[in-house]
Amino acid sequence: MRPASLQGASRESFASARETLGTLIRSGDTDLPALGDDLFAVTAVLDEQGPLRRALTDPSRNGDDRTALARGVFADKVGSSALDVLAWAVRARWSGSRDLANSSELLAVDSLMAAAEKSGRLETVEDELFRLGRIVAGAPDLRSALSDQSAPVESRSALIEGLLQGRVTDETRRLVVQAVTAPRGRTFDSIMSEYVRVAAQRRDQLVATVTATVPLTEEQRGRLRAALSRIYGHEIHLNVDIDTSLVGGVRVAIGDEVIDGSVVAKLDDARRRLVG
């Protein structure tokens, strides 16, 4: 779920709720991991309880009424920081009731990214999430096991916890467990991609997924990063994936745009020119 997919009033309301989150982050005394967990818990309740979700976004009810309802439902479920974020969110107008739940999830992810940033681990978390997404995408049996909705949540959680087992940061562990236990209709690797985008946004960077035949050296990474930064006028974070079928060259994807400099792409282009 990308912020960009929110439309009209929902986009403005999400931005406003994110400002409230930013105030809590800057305060310095907010337990950000706990806030993230609480906002994930809010998301789960909103997903499960359609009538509540609709009541909290009902434009015919005034903001005070919606806020009182939110505090009454969640006061014994989450901490005061999460309640403050939710109260601000339900005062706003939403284009659709599900946008509130989607925004709650994004704010939860942002809270954990902020925790990683304060600890100097944000880039590490970003890289870990990218690698885990690629690992699971390339292992069909593991992917099936993690996405099996007929399996108890506890078993899926235990499986991923066992695989991670001290190998990643605490923020990555929390995010990955969330992705496995509450995928919300998405694949694991697509969730990892969404989380990586949130991390990049917090680092004020664009994410470039680079597919190459062999690992890039630090010098090559630096040159490519500098070139892309000049093209896009923005700082670039590189995620590098290896695909030997490319034969040579690299393919770079930034958002929906693909810059394909691989040998295979050049051969295909030459072939099209010959037959066309």
Image (tube, rainbow, N blue to C red):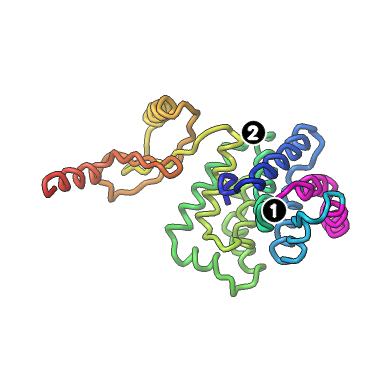
Mark nearer the N terminus (1 vs 2): 1
Other-residue count near label 1 (Cα within 10 Å), few / some / many at <14 / 14–19 / ≥20: many
The residue most toward the front is 60
Total numbered labels = 2
State the residue at coordinates (69%, 58%).
Answer: 97
99 versus 236 height, above or below: below
Is residue 55 or residue 235 the one in the foreground? 55
Q: Position of residue 120 (x, y in %)?
A: 64, 33
Q: Position of residue 18 (x, y in %)?
A: 70, 40
The residue most toward the left is 274
Asked if the residue under mark 2 is in contact with the one under mark 1, i.e. CB atoms within 8 Å, the reply is no
197 versus 105 height, above or below: above
Is residue 99 or residue 119 the one in the foreground? 99
Quick check: is 91 in the magenta stretch? yes
In the displayed structure image, the side of residue 41 where residue 175 appears, left or right: left
Quick check: is 152 in the magenta stretch? no
Q: Is residue 44 visible?
A: yes
Name the amino acid, label 2. Answer: Gly
Other-residue count near label 2 (Cα within 10 Å), few / some / many at <14 / 14–19 / ≥20: few
State the residue at coordinates (60%, 73%).
Answer: 151
Q: Which residue is mark 1?
A: 100
Is residue 23 or residue 31 the one in the foreground? 23
State the residue at coordinates (49%, 63%).
Answer: 143
Q: Position of residue 219 (x, y in %)?
A: 38, 27
Name the amino acid, label 1. Answer: Leu
Image: magenta residue range: 65-94
In the displayed structure image, the side of residue 136 where residue 195 appears, left or right: right
Q: Which residue is mark 2?
A: 120
Q: Is residue 218 visible?
A: no
